Image: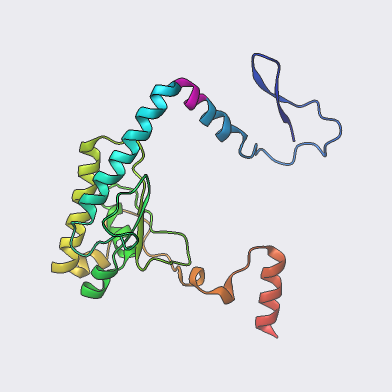
Amino acid sequence: MPLVNFDGENYFWDYDVPDTIGKVRAFYGTVPAIIRAYAWIMSLGEEGLKEVAKTAVLNSNYLFKKVTDIPGASAPYAPGKHRFEQVRYSWEKLTKDTGITSEDVQRRMCDFGMHYWTSHHPWIVPEPFTLEPTESYSKDELDQYINALAKISQEAYTDPEKVKNAPYNSVVHKINNEPLDDPERWAVTWRSYLKKHKKAKS
């Protein structure tokens, strides 16, 4: 694998590394992400960083207020408190009221052409969805996203089958996530997978 080197003016890939095993594959790890982050920070400067931080917090709290006004949505931790940048919301009430789950909402969001992330498995917050607007989005874009969530909530209460059968504009439909919530089926390495697989067969 090449190293990242610095000659006093430029960063560059240094392929002259005779004590390594050589190129393994075309993957440079986290180095490109670190360089991009460094370049972004340097281009913004001190005042720019303060500004984007304020905008990110403002966007997050605007979204927080609007999303928690949507029927069926909540933010279960530290109710009423302001958030910094990322909030783990819950559709638990929506699910209890209508049977529509966070993953149903996720598939319906595809029809609006919007990204929607539930959470890492296993879920700690019931029926979670995690929104992180950062500093990148305008108020109009946030409002468009909020309106899509509100529309899906309305559909869940009035026509739940429409949400359950989504998406309508995508080639990908339902993915079975049950193994993600079953510790008996987890295997973080190939060796542990083989052990569990052999154990299940014996």
Q: Is residue 139 left or right of residue 104?
A: left
93 with respect to 200 (left or right): left
Q: Quarter of the image for the C terminus: give it.
A: bottom right
The answer to which of 186 and 51 lies nearer the viewer is 51
User: How many discs mark residues in the rendered view?
Assistant: 0
Residue 89 appearing in the image: yes
Residue 15 within the segment the image draws in magenta: no
Most extreme residue toward the right is 19
Residue 143, above or below 54: below
Residue at horizontal 35%, vertical 58%?
129
- The picture quadrant where one finds residue 108 is bottom left
Name which residue lies at 38% across and 48% down: 86
Which is nearer the eye, 32 or 177?
Answer: 32
> What colouring style does the render use?
rainbow
In this rendering, would 33 be left or right of 200?
Answer: left
The image shows residue 38 at horizontal and vertical percentages of: 54, 27
Quadrant of res 17? top right
Query: Magenta segment, which residues?
Result: 39-43
